[in-house]
Amino acid sequence: MNNKQQVLSTDVLVIGGGIAGLAAAVTIKETDSNTDVLIVEKQTTGYSGKANRGGGVLQYFDFNRVDPMEFVGYHANAVGCFLGDQEQMLRYVKMNNQMIDKLIEWGVKVPFNEDGTLKIIPTGPMTGMIGVDLDITLQVRRTAEKKGVKIIDKVTVSDLLTNNNEIVGATGYSLLDGTFYVIKAKSVILATGSQNYRVINMWSNGRGDGIAAKPS
């Protein structure tokens, strides 16, 4: 009760400053520059998430030889993700080349061959891999800031706030001085990643924050 308290308001609250949260924030600003967007990250946006800790790679689908529907079937049956969101997986595959173009536009260094084609490393019967610099999220943060995205680092979001079963914001606290935040938002995007901190050390930040979030 003795800690400082701060109330903030925004149009869109993005929880998580990894590649997903940054991409969402930049995309919103590109769609409507007047929309107020706030990223809240428990560590440091641009250095957080798994994109810059997982080897600096992008998944790639060559649509000249891969049909998106065939990959969804392969992913569900051969990889074993039958219970996953297959419609979302289909959308992800279809947007793959578009998102790589966007990352280049946002300042990410993507390798090309001398003939101008992307430098692809085959990784399976239907996929390839593109190696990128480990500062991928830092580059996108710079783009987000240029477009007016607001960022608060070192704040852990602890709960989601609801009104009539609609999420209307979140609460959190500063890791630096304990300041308690109440953030009101018209929309909330959970971009906190998966839970795999026990799998490998470089994924220790994937602690399942969003999965465990419970509206208050």
Image (cartoon, helix red, strand yellow):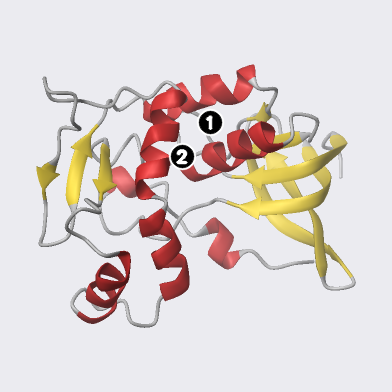
Classify residue 75 by image quadrant.
bottom left
Left or right: 132 with respect to 157? Answer: left
Classify residue 136 by image quadrant.
top left
Q: Residue furthest front?
A: 64
Mark with earlier residue (2, 1): 2
The type of residue carrying mark 2 is Ile
The type of residue carrying mark 1 is Thr
Give percent across and percent down for residue 216. 79, 66
Q: Which mark is residue 45?
A: 1
Image: 150 above or below 204: above
Disc 1 secondary structure class: loop
Disc 2 secondary structure class: helix
In this view, the residue in front, 212 or 144, is 144
The residue at 45%/35% (across/down) is 48
Q: CA distance from mark 2 to mark 1?
A: 9 Å
Residue 167 in view, yes or no: yes
Which residue is disc 2 drawn over? 19
Left or right: 122 with respect to 61? Answer: left
